[in-house]
Amino acid sequence: MRNQLRVQLFLLDNLIWVILLVFFLLNTLVTPRFATYDNLVNIFYHSAIMSMLVLAQGLIMIIGHLDLSIESTLAFAPGIAMLLANKWIPVGIDPVTCIALTLAVGALVGLFNGYCITKIGVNPFLQSLSMLIMLRGIVLFLVPFSIFPLDKVYVYAGQARMVGNIPVAIPIVLVIFIIFHLILQYTPFGRHFVATGGNPRASFISGINTNRVIMYAFVISGLLAAVAGLLAAGRQGSVSNSMGEGMVLLSFAGAILGGASLEGGKGTPLGMLGGALLLGMISNSLNLLGVGVNLVYATQGALIFVAIVIDRLRVKFRGHLLHQEQIQKILHRENQDPNLSTVG
């Protein structure tokens, strides 16, 4: 493969960081107070919750599916944990166990999704859509009013600050992204994960238990949505039934902008982090510029459209580059050995 093609493919796979840099530089010139230290910390902090959903959605997209239930899981997991601790179990539950319960509930939601998809054969889109609606309905019924106050240990991840006034949520999110990046890039599980989305039939024939990989993917997705719920509950100091509403479509946009594809088998966690940060930067800049709420909502819709278009263009351009590379190889071989040329 030519060095020029390697560079082009690298830029194509990491397009989000180019877009992020350009958007940052433009806002530094146009948007007041955008590049200040406090505002940059604010962008990272307010991107933390969305970044967990972007990662969850991106991992599911890598295996070739979608998970619409993550925004409801975000509210459902901490809601059930808090009800168990404060209402359903008379003796109460300590906050550390509550955190473990929150994560366990999220994982169980993902396990249920994965089981229905792999064992029963339910369509993944319809399965996650039904869970989106069902879980939100349950939360609205069980948590009609916000649950507060929450224990300091429970809200620590979403509320505490470190040296330099940096929220604890930021390093937690960065560590999670790095862990998943290392898993996907350097472990057999990661290779099986990507292969399952790239070509499920060939992966199954080669010995990969694709159903198990899909099951694991949905469990991880539910777990990450529960982490997002912990961060959301910590940030607002309560658990409400509206947490996560309207975030699933933006998580889809962030994942695609970060390099994931509707076709499956593509994407990296670090790219998805870039997609989440871009969403955070756009929201922050619109707020600083005083853009109306309705226009912000319209902009979010435009982002989803742009993400879909970028996905299509990226696939086509990659195919074009690889096709041109094959033509160059054929021409090179023919120049080296004229006898290989087709006789007309």
Image (spheres, rainbow, N blue to C red):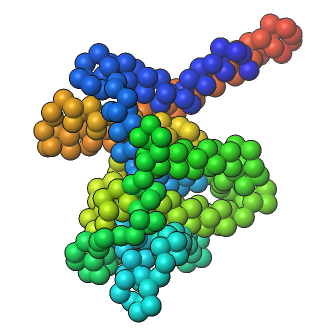
Closer to the camera, 181 or 163? Answer: 163
Q: Image quadrant of residue 281?
A: top left
User: Measured along the vertical axis of the image, is residue 43 above or below residue 100?
Assistant: above
> Considering depth in this image, is 282 or 197 the residue closer to the camera?
282
Identified at 20% across, 40% down, the residue is: 296
Left or right: residue 62 versus residue 25 is: right
Question: Residue 108, percent across and down?
Answer: 53, 75
Residue 60's x, y, as percent? 53, 55
Work out which quarter of the rendered image holds the C terminus and state it. top right
Up-down relation of residue 32 to residue 182 (above or below): above
At horizontal 65% and vertical 62% (from top left) the residue drawn is 213
| Quadrant of the image occupied by residue 166 | top left
Is there any visible trace of residue 58 in the rendered image? no
Residue 150 visible in image: yes
Quadrant position of the N terminus in the picture: top right
Describe residue 112's horizontal placement relative to residue 245 as left or right. right
Q: Is residue 164 above or below residue 194?
A: above
Position of residue 102 in the picture relative to residue 297 (left or right): right
At a point 65% along the width and 14% down the height, the residue shown is: 4
Foreground of the two, 144 or 168: 168
Residue at image position (47%, 49%) is 168
